[in-house]
Image (spheres, rainbow, N blue to C red):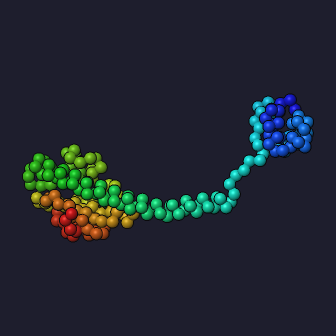
Amino acid sequence: MGHFPWNVIEELVERRGQASRHGSAKDLSDASLRSVWQYGPDLNEQEFVMKNQKGFSLVELLVVIIIIGIIAVIAIPNLLSSRKAANESSAISTLRSVHGAQTTYFATAGGNTSYGSFQQLATEKLLDPTFNSATTVTKSGYTFSLSTAAGIYCVSAAPQSSSTGTRSFGIDERGVIFAGAASGDVTCASGVRSGGAAL
């Protein structure tokens, strides 16, 4: 019993009201001490853990789970709406960047006669390497499709799914952004845009 921290045990015994019944802690039996402390096999390490630890009740845990569920129901739709709005803003910004790149390409590599593909624009370093594809590129939840013809071009942007965006967008050589209320409202064919209203 020489390994027990008697000063700590005496304080614990007093808290539990056993001092009045048993006297000092050193007079307690091993069984009484074990009812106060749970200790490992190596007493020299003095790794003592109180047995009378209290945790959360089942009702308290259920209340916490219900509160978390309510918060999730309220927050998740708002997060999805914010994500859609961010993707739509990114799509509009990308279309403006494409138009700037096409204007530069037309006046330089295009010889004032033709517009370039996404791949040609990226090769000329007018767009980032993400656009290293001929006609279709996916970026920030939107799919961008390019169509060119003699002296004209059109790019459409459609959301990949209903969770990444709602509206569709488009731009042509005039540099005006057009928007449609749903995916597929703005389309391009042979360098000509159809559908949508000017923003």
In this picture, residue 60 sits left or right of residue 49? left
- State the quadrant of the C terminus: bottom left
Q: Is residue 171 above or below residue 6?
A: below
Asked if residue 178 can be seen in this view, the reply is yes
Foreground of the two, 153 or 78: 78
Residue 94 placed where, x, y %?
25, 54
Going 25% across and 54% down the picture, which residue do you hit? 93
Asked if residue 39 can be seen in this view, the reply is no
**Which quarter of the picture shows residue 13?**
top right
The furthest residue to the front: 20
Residue 88 placed where, x, y %?
30, 59
Going 91% across and 36% down the picture, which residue do you hit? 27
**Which quarter of the picture shows residue 95?**
bottom left
Going 30% across and 63% down the picture, which residue do you hit? 158
Residue 69 placed where, x, y %?
54, 62
Going 28% across and 65% down the picture, which residue do you hit? 168
In this picture, residue 100 sits left or right of residue 10? left
In this picture, residue 144 sits left or right of residue 16? left
Q: Is residue 25 above or below residue 117?
A: above
